[in-house]
Amino acid sequence: MRKIYLDHGATTPVDKKVLAAMMPYFSDKFGNAMSIHNFGSVANEAVEKSRKQTADFFGAQPEEMIFTSGATESNNLVVKGVLNAYYFTPKALGAQHEGIERHRVPSRPHIITTAFEHHCVLDSCKEVEKEGLAEVTYIKPNKDGIIKVEDIKKAIKSNTILVSVMYVNNEIGTVQSIAEIGNLLRNTKKIRNTKVRTKYPIFHTDATQAINYFDCNVDKFGVDLLSMSAHKIYGPKGIGALYIRKGTPIKRVQDGGGQENNKRAGTHNVPGIVGLGAAMELVKKEKVKGKSILEIRNYLIERVLKEIPQAKLNGSKIKRSPNNANFSFKNVEGESLLMMLDMEGIAASTGSACTSGNLEPSHVLMSLGMKHEDAHGSLRLTLGKSTTKKEIDYTVNKLKKIVEKIRKVSGKVLEEYYSKK
């Protein structure tokens, strides 16, 4: 049976060049990067080379990059680590406890994020909210999946310490105005002219889905913290990074060692780190491939909207990642759609991979104001550098028949069910 992979938003295959770079560090160069003997030195040299490769990609300094297990860990560290620094390390703010009281820094800080962030950001925010450690504002996107910078500006308070906005949404692929938000927050910091507050609000973006296709220079966008995962850019799973601008107050949440500038304890995943660095190098060389992916993606969107009745593209077509197409189909249940596509050899998703076991409709689509039943009938197709036009033709032809079949079998039942709710 033909196999077509259209779920690159969930993960990508490891590039053969990346795998080749990793292989020696599994068995031949197996040392612990923290060991002081030659075996450790060889491993440490590889770690530091990857750190520089990663930092160079973002226009950062090597000492500003720390390695994590991926964007989920990085995002947890951002939310909880910034709060830890706020509550427990006043020296990081440029003042002693007495100074904090003198400048009346609120004891309960404020965080701003969006209603359609990845669950690792949303759940972290909800957890600190539940524990009474912070108040959180969740900015809703407009119907096209775009966050208005003006809404962030209105939400900023005197006690706002963190603003976290995903660069490219992982489900609908919409691109946010990160540079504009960064400029807003830079100006906010200038207004706050006390020593205690000049570092706040800290600006974080999850750039996991952006790296393959967009500029990610941290100075250009004014971000203080940036998260990413290697497995979205043809690197290995289980490795990622967090950019931390020098001087940004953030305290580790994982104890047990002095690794990563005391920001993340744990033995280095040397093969994974090497793979991350190699993947970053490949992205720099292959950025031009985004244009060909965009052409194929647009062809996919045009065929689906033209040939399948009551199909809708979710999110802006213009402010969108070139590899992402997210549709909803009236009176079609998403899980059934996925299973039938899989039977035809087509791999897709009905939302983010992290929530594929959850039968609730996508929180991303619901945040756009979609009805429950429409959000339930969603399909995410994410292309990669190996995707061909022939594969898209095969997929659309099969999709047309599957949607028609589902509607005949269960469409009326679904329509009646939701009309009674």
Image: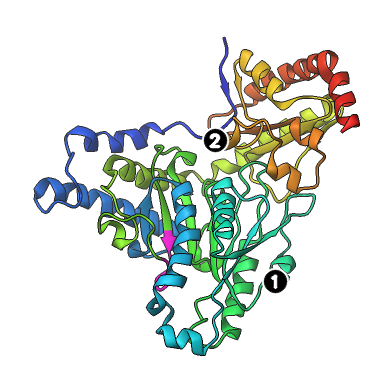
| Residue 10 image label | 2
Q: Residue furthest bottom?
A: 102
Query: Quadrant where the C terminus lies?
Result: top right
What residue is drawn where x is 61% and y is 62%? 178
What residue is drawn where x is 37% and y is 59%? 65
Would residue 412 appear left or right of 206 to someone viewing this image? right
Q: Is residue 276 above or below residue 53?
A: above
Q: Secondary structure at mark 2?
A: loop
Would residue 37 appear left or right of 362 to someone viewing this image? left
| Residue 310 image label | none
Question: Label 2 neighbourhood size at 10 Å, few (<14), some (14-19), many (20+)?
Answer: some
- Read off the magenta span: 243-250
Would residue 104 appear left or right of 335 to someone viewing this image? left
* Residue 411 x, y percent position in the rendering: 85, 20
Read off the residue under disc 1. Answer: 153
Pick the residue in front: 400 or 379. 379
Pick the residue in front: 193 or 276. 193
Query: Quadrant where the N terminus lies?
Result: top right
Residue 250 appears in the rendering:
yes
Prevailing secondary structure class for the magenta stretch in the rendered image: loop
* Residue 285 x, y percent position in the rendering: 45, 46
Q: Quadrant of residue 231?
A: top left
Would residue 32 appear left or right of 229 to someone viewing this image? left
What residue is drawn where x is 70% and y is 71%? 153
Q: Residue furthest top?
A: 1
Q: Amino acid at mark 2?
A: Ala
Q: Amino acid at mark 1?
A: Lys
Residue 248 appears in the rendering:
no
Q: Is 202 one of the magenta-colored residues?
A: no
